[in-house]
Amino acid sequence: MLGVNDSRLEPARRSPDTGPAAPSLAPGEQRARPRRVAVIGAGITGLATAFRLERERPSWEVVVFEAEPHVGGKIRTAVRDGYTVDWGPNGFLASAPETLRLVRDLGLEEVLQPAATSARKRYLYLDGGLRTLPATPPAFLASEVVPLHGRLRAALEIVLATAGAGEESVHAFLARHFGRVFADALADAFVSGIAAGDPRELSLDALFPRLRAMERTHRSLVLALIAQQRAARYARVASAAPRGATEKGASEKGAAPKDGAAPTRGLTSFRDGGMQRLLDALRGALRGGVRLAARVEALEPRADGHDLRVAGASTGPFDDVVLTVPAPAAAALLRPHLPAAAEALAAIPYAGIRVFGLGFDRIDVPRALDGFGFLAARGQGVRSLGVLWTSSLYPDRAPVGKVLLRVLAGGRLDPSMLELTGEDALAAVRRDLRVSMGITVEPEFVEAVAWQQAIPQYTLGHAERLRGVEVALEGLPGVHLAGNAYRGVGVNDCVREAVRVAAHLAGRAA
């Protein structure tokens, strides 16, 4: 997603089948050339796939093709006039071993930048003001974000919760557990910062399989959260204890809780350059390099692999081709060979997003910036999806005495935001800042980008459609799909996809 990450909502991805194996060499046959792999797309998934393949198989030739004149996809950072603005994700949750290993392998550990602890406090714009989003079930009961009768119904979740049968939308799932009043009040905000989508269309099972797993294990989501918090407390105590004390305490008090892993660590980025440091480091580490401004126009299967047509010329052959481009671009390449799979990919909808980085003098922002920022419930008179208080998360992102706000607008419920001129869109978000935060002055710094295809939408039936595409790909050995359109939209999900594909290819050829 483009910036509003939450460790409690992080979609924990399931490991899919690795897919069919490509034809192997006949006994005694010698390969005349090193194995060659083409990665199409130089976003985080493509670059991480190439990097991991080069690490796992140093003798292989891995070439990355990118249609744009720069790497990164939607992970880009603008540094200007003392401000640092991420155009896409503003960090990753430092909870995924695959991403942390990638950071370590790239030598970036020393420049990791955890968000300030104030980021744990979040707000919702509701009923004309910013309301604190409760972080625990007890805090929710005293919160103003849901009417009293809705809170009382939600409190009964621990008793009334039942296991679901079949796929559900995010809204239906929340309504079944906590009541319709709760779902109507919070479902939009629940998904807007992650997918910018419509909670009545988005599949809970595809976007948040972790919540479905919690339901299967505990029946009640409240019980599951209590179990996770207990496990997190135990892990914090264990990590702080002197060597030997953990084992002693465990023997005296019983085994560690089994209901959760180590505590999830929070939002993290990189000093002196934001998220683009990760992409630049990946590009610099690749031996095979990246061919920029090299749009792949066609995929051409042949007896010993696949050729690619780039700028009217054929290049290849490649034993494997990994498509990490957005689903519509992957569909265009597959359409001549697998029309049904291409149709399914082309049907994956996307939410368009406008991102504004706005800089102000601190004195011109009348309220305390004591948290992550706020999400805006729909129908409350604020058009923006949310506002991140970036300079509160990462103080070095704005000059001394200034603040940097990052506004996200558009999404599936407001597609017309992408049709506005830049001036009109800026006027709309400035109005939102005036209404929600009392900011009346013009920003002294403006950085803006419009992503027409920002975030893929996992609508109902997504998992089934994806299984159909994977089966169809068996008819085109050596071609693989990876990216945020399939099994997770976050940075961690994309790195996990890269590791999955690289491990499959490297292991299959072992």
Image (cartoon, grey):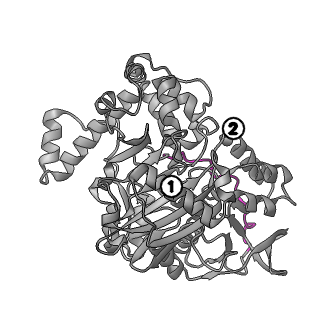
Residue 23 lies within the magenta run: yes
The residue at the point 61 percent across, 78 percent down is: 70
- Name the image quarter holding residue 137: top left
Q: Nearer the viewer, residue 478 or 438?
A: 438
Instruction: Give left or right: position of 209 versus 325.
Output: left
Residue at left offset 50%, top offset 41%: 377
Residue identified by numbered label 1: 431
SS for dot 2: loop
In x, y percent, where is residue 113? 33, 67
Tell me what residue is drawn at x 67 percent, y 79 percent: 34
Residue range corresponding to the magenta coloring: 12-29
Question: Where is residue 73 drawn, in percent x and y?
Answer: 60, 68
- Residue under pointer 2: 461
**Dominant secondary structure of the residues highlighted in magenta in the image:** loop
- Residue situated furthest front in the rendering: 440
Estimate how packed mark 2 is, as few (under 14), some (14 to 19) or many (20 or more) residues with alpha carbons within 10 Å: some
* Residue 250 location, quadrant: top left
Magenta segment: does it hold 388?
A: no
**How far is mark 1 from mark 2, CA to CA?**
38 Å
Residue 61 left/right relative to 301: left
Amino acid type for the residue under numbered disc 2: Gly
Task: Say what secondary structure mark 1 lies in.
Answer: helix
Q: Is residue 65 visible?
A: yes
x and y, in percent, of residue 314 in the image = 82, 80
Q: Amino acid at mark 1?
A: Arg
